[in-house]
Structure formats: C-alpha cells, structure tokens
Amino acid sequence: MDKFGKSQPVTRFEDQRFLTGHGRYVDDITPQGALFAYVLRSSVAHGRITTLDVEEAREAPGVHLVLTAGDLAGAGVTEGMAINTVTNRDGSKPAAPRRPILAEGRVRFVGEPVAMIVADTLQEARDAAEMIEFDHDDLPAHMEIGPGGQALHDDAPDNRAFDWAMGDEQAVTAAIEKAAHVVRMPLRDNRIIANPMEPRGCYAETTGNRLHVAVNGQGVWGTKGNLARVLGMQPGDIRVTNPDVGGGFGTKAMDYPETYLVAHAARVLDRPVRWMADRTETMLSDNSGRGLDHDLTLAFDADLKITAYRVDSRVDLGAYCSTMGQGIQTDLFSKVLMGVYDVQDTFLHVEGFFTNTTQVDAYRGAGRPEAIYALERIMDRAARELGVDTWDLHRRNFIPKSAFPYVSSTGETYDVGDFARVLDRIEAESDRAGFAARKAASTARGRLRGMGLCYYIESILGNPSETAKVEFNEDGSVSIYVGTQSNGQGHETVYAQFLSDQTGIPVDRITVVQGDSDRIATGGGTGGSRSVTTQNNATLATVSKMIAAFIPYLADKMGVDEGEVGFDDETFRAGGSNLTPTLIEAADMARADGRTDLLVHEETATLPARSFPNGAHVAEVEVDPETGKVTLERYTVVDDFGNLINPLLVAGQVHGGTVQGVGQALVEHVVHDEDGQLLTASFMDYAMPRADDVPMIRFATEPVPSTANAMGMKGCGEAGTVGAMAATANAVADALWDRGVRQADMPFTPHRVWKMLNDAVAPVD
C-alpha cells in the first residue's frame, strides 16, 4: 500500500508512455503489410443514386478490392446497422428505417458511405475513388426539426421518428392552470461535434477461420456481437480488441459502417486491412451531439415552490435512428430531469425527427446535460421574472436532507443528498459577496458583467454489472482484468490504486488488462460515468472472494482454525502464529504447493441501485457590448461525488468536462446550409475552446457518501459538462438582462451576442 495511505492524489501511471510517444493506438499497431481502406462518401445530403460504376476503380494501380452495397449483398452481407427505438405515446410502433452499411439506392446525408476501396497505399485508394462514376438525382433536403418536407424514409412520411411522453399530462395541465405563477420559455440546445483527439479507426486480420478486429472504441463486446450478426459468423470465431484510445466522449460507444467493411475486406482478401478517418471525415460521419428545441413551462405556488414542470422537446436525430439515436434522448429526461427539485407533477414530451444530417446521438463529455440545461435555464429565467434571487429559489425547491431516500416525480429513488450544504459551500468559494464590486468595476470600464448558477444532478447509467479477475503471475506481478475501457480517463491508475488499497499489493506490481474479448469474457465498456463505480464494485467482490479462498489454505499453514485468520488489507494474521504473509507471499506459497486454484480469482458484481452525483457550478462573465465578445472571468465548481479514490484524477475530469460545456456555450456550433452541406467541416470553421477561453477552474468537494455501493462512490466523468452549459449561459443571460435581452441561446459567439444586444428592447426598470 502507498506509504501515504488510501485515496491519495496519485499522478497517472499511463502518462509516462503517453507523453513519451509510447502509446499503442490503433494506427500504431496495425499489422505489417496491411492494406489501406478509403471510403467514398456522398457529396450531397439527399439524392437517388442513378449510377455507381466502380469497374475502372477496380482496375486502378494497387487496388485489391472495391465494395458497394451490391457487392455486400452478393457476398451474403445483408444485415443493416443496429437500431434503437422507443414506443410512441399512443402505444404504436415508431419508425425504424433500415440503415445500410453502404448506401442502397439513396443517400441521406453528406458523408454517408457509398463505396470502399482497398489498395496497397492510401494514395492509391484515394486515386481509385476518383475513378468511380457516382451520379444521382438530387432530392430536397429536410433540415427542420419538425414534420413535413421531403420524406427521408418510406415508413416516416412526415419525417417523424417517434412521439414519446411520460408523466401525467392532465395533472400537469391542471396544476399549471391553478398556479399562482407560471413561467414559460423556449430554448435551443445547439448541435456540437464530438471531435476526440484521435479520430475513429480500425484494422482487421484473419488467422484461419478466426477474425480479429481492433477498433478504438468504448468497449469490445457490443462490437463483437454486431460483427457476428452482420458477417454471419460464430461469436467464438471473432476477437475484438480496443488498444489505447484517444478520447471517446460517447461518439465511439457505437459501431460504424467502416468496422464491418474492413472486417469483410480482410476476410475476402485474407490480408490485414486498415482504415483511419481524417478530421473532416470525423466531422462529416461521426455521430454528433445535442440538437434540440425545447418549450418549457414551470408552475409555482404562492410560496414559489414548483408545483409542476412541463417540457416539450423536438430532437434532431439525423438521417437514421441507429444505435442510441432515439432512446437516449428520452432517457435523459425521464431519469434525471427533476432530480434536485421537490416538484409534484412532471410531464415530458419528446418528438424525434429525421433530417438530412449525420446521426445526433453522441454526447461529448456527458450524457445528461440537456435535461439540466433546460431546467436550470428556466429556473434562472423564473427568478428574474418573479423578482426573486435565483439562489433563494433553488433553496426553496431543494429536496431537504431529511427527506432522503426520496422518490422523484420521474420515479428515481435518490439515496442521499445535502444540496443546501453544497450550495452554501459554492456561495463562499465563488465569492458571491464580492460580485457586486466586480460588476461595478466592469461597468466603469463600459463592460457588462453577469454571474450564473447551475445546480445539477445526474445518475450513473449503463449496465450496473461488471466482472473483475485477479491473476497472480510467476514473476511476482499481478494482473487485474476489467470489463470497462479507458478512453483517456486514467483507469489504469485508479484500478491499480484501488486494488492496492484493498489488498496491500504494491501498485507497481499491478497491471490492468482491458479491451480484449478473448482475455475478458464480459464487460460493459465505458460510458455514463459507470466505469470506476461498477468496476471497483466488482474488484471489491473479487478481493472478498480471494481472501475467503486463501484463508483455509493459510489456516492449515498457520496451524489454527479458519475462524482465527484475518486479513488487514495488507497481511494475513492469526493469534498464536508468527506467519503473516502478504497476498503476494501467499500466492508464492500456493504456487510452490501446486495450488494453482488460488492463483486466479474472478467475480461478477451488480450494483443494487444507481448513485447520483450532484453539485453546483458558478460562472462569471464579462461582455463587451461594442463587439459582443464574452470573456469567462471566473469559474467555480463544488461537487458531491461521494468518496473519492484519486482526487487528482477527479479534478482533471471536472476541469475537462467543464471546458467542454463552456465550449458549447461560447464557441461551438454545427452549421449546415439549406441543402444539408456541413459548413463547419474543419477546425478552420468549427471553433473548439482554447486555453485562453477558460480561466483556472476552482474546484472543491462536499462528499455525501452514496449508500448504493459499498465504496460510497457516485461517479464523476461527465459532471463537469452537465453543469457548465447552464452556468455559463445563465451568466451571459445575467449580463445581458439589464440591456433588455430576454432570450439568449447558445452559442454566445461575439456576433450573436452583439445582435442580441442590438435587437433587444429597451431595459425595463
């Protein structure tokens, strides 16, 4: 065990190899002599394919294979991409159009794969793609988040994918009608591009009848199952691996056509085949995030307690409903929308619409910011319209500490919480008392200053089960096999640190093994802030099983009864025996005695309930009314993540997530023209947050340990983004309010803010 004790802020072990160029990313480890794949993509958003002639490309220098939808069908590859749907509010089935691996008859978004070329070099594959005759009849593009227009799919004539709702609409309507105060607000949640540092990529190779696919994803088992389905193979004949992954953010949680195409090509050619996206391909073809319009209503009684909340959302799904495109949006609202507030009635209504764009179902940095963003923006608006302090409005509507466990209006059971304590802490940490003086100083310089608050809650989503296996190796090292997948969060450090904390095994002897379907039987991958909580819950169960297995063996060695042997997180001890072996020493003894059954221990554990991280963000901005430029001057976060394993990694997660949310609020915005062409298809046109856009983030924790798991943890991976969007937006709205701006939607770019100020009505006293 580390000499400084448990739960220390340890720097990441894996950073040594990452920072010295020794990372093993998918493009670094491609087999020698692998062929290069290049994907020909649609250049139009909507069209009927009239010609797709690839014969000249097949004869081009260096070309080994050209694949079209017809070639796939001829080879028996007829399955489409996986889809995810929700049932309509009237009980009817939603639209569930087929999404082909390569375009079949029509193209429906710019960037949709039409053909794949495999050649000796990437340049030869690109050159061959230029020889493909691809003609089409243009069809009108549908770019509105709403019904009507040219239908993208026959089974969705009005482009409506689903019409879902939950809650008691009648009760909410009645509560709104009799409310003392009602506040309504439209809201736009802008679309963003995920943009992981490492674009998507994969390679495939065959050995006999076995197929190995390496992909920089967020887990291996879903990909393995889909490969078996699409290629008609037995799962046992497929191995999927995830090497080092340079960022996922939700966009790599699902499969894409290129994975199947590369795998099929490797089988046809019996040669390794590789593919890597460039940045523009990433922007054109990867699943985007957000893209919603909301109409929000809050009802209050005379004491300003929220009595009802209604949200009507229209969701941009893109051209298809594959992977999580539909289900995740409804899950966002149903699980966490009203978590912090003691509201009586809620009605949630979400409609999904097809547009001629790529999928919108990945959520960079977080899976639940839309719900919190909607609630916190109208909470802030309500305070202004009702003439009360927004901090006081929050306090009036918090679930009191004495009410836990608490069942929310959306059916979630929150085990613990002390929201008022967290809010008190951030009020001090953000120096709210000094804001008036800072605002006066800004005013003296001709600037507008605003402060924005967001109180969020989220839940740990995804598969609650995970498996851990611990193996003692002959060289004295220990391997822990995990079912999650690091995308850069520091899992190798935190898993080794936790195992060391529980067993006393030195961390420098522990190796974390992940991302290999041959070496690890099951796993849920990474996503939804689930990894550390679910995986360490499984590790805890495995350690318990391991200790219980060693005790009878060591009792015999010590010459005592089993009941007298204990383990103190470092050594086994028993009264009357001077034998005090560590686990490493006990494993060496077992190996010498031929007890190989004691060298490998495995256990699966399931969390009994969700845990609910929560916290508060306070942003402070200054606006130049002459140019519209928004400067983020101060930013403070206080979170309740329960117990922490490594506070340093937690701070890093919060900082990164916060910057992502700030980026969406201030600079990021996907723009298409009326014909569905992506106008922000490179970093020349799509703005990502830079170092000088964000001040140093002040971060503190107020832990209330969860009762939903033995470790008292709550998860933290997405929390920064969940709070940052609303806090930043509310700060800008606060700065603009006195100038008469009543509707302020992200992103707050200089031109948009300048226009808001110039279009605003005269301020009202």
Image (cartoon, grey):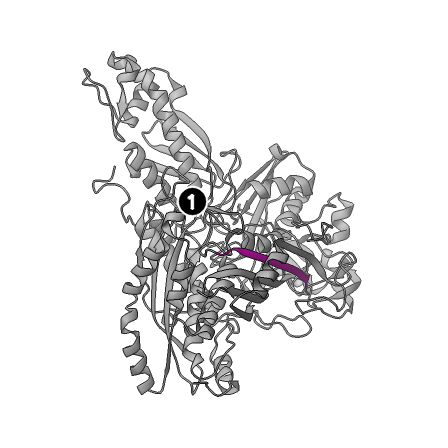
Residue at x-position 41% and y-position 26%: 600
Residue 226 position within the rendered picture, expressed as x and y whole percent measured from the top left: 63, 43
Residue 439 lies in quadrant: bottom left
Work out whether 337 lies above or below 264: below
Residue 650 position within the rendered picture, expressed as x and y whole percent measured from the top left: 35, 52
**Relative to residue 196, is residue 489 drawn left or right?**
left
**Relative to residue 108, is residue 753 drawn left or right?**
left
Work out whether 179 lies above or below 736: above
Question: Is residue 251 visible in the rendered structure shown here?
Answer: no
Comparing 318 with 514, the one in front is 318
Type of amino acid under label 1: Pro
Q: Is residue 345 magenta?
A: yes
Residue at x-position 30% and y-position 66%: 430
Residue at x-position 55% and y-position 68%: 190
Residue 751 position within the rendered picture, expressed as x and y whole percent measured from the top left: 50, 82
Task: Report the predominant secondary structure element of the magenta stretch.
Answer: strand
Comparing 71 with 459, the one in front is 459
Comparing 200 with 32, the one in front is 200
Residue 105 lies in quadrant: bottom right
Q: Is residue 276 magenta?
A: no
Comparing 183 with 693, the one in front is 183
Task: Determine the secondary structure under disc 1.
Answer: loop
Q: Which residues are magenta?
A: 343-354
Can you say which quadrant of the picture contains the N terminus? Answer: top left
Residue at x-position 44% and y-position 84%: 739
- Residue holding disc 1: 405
Question: Is residue 762 visible in the rendered structure shown here?
Answer: yes
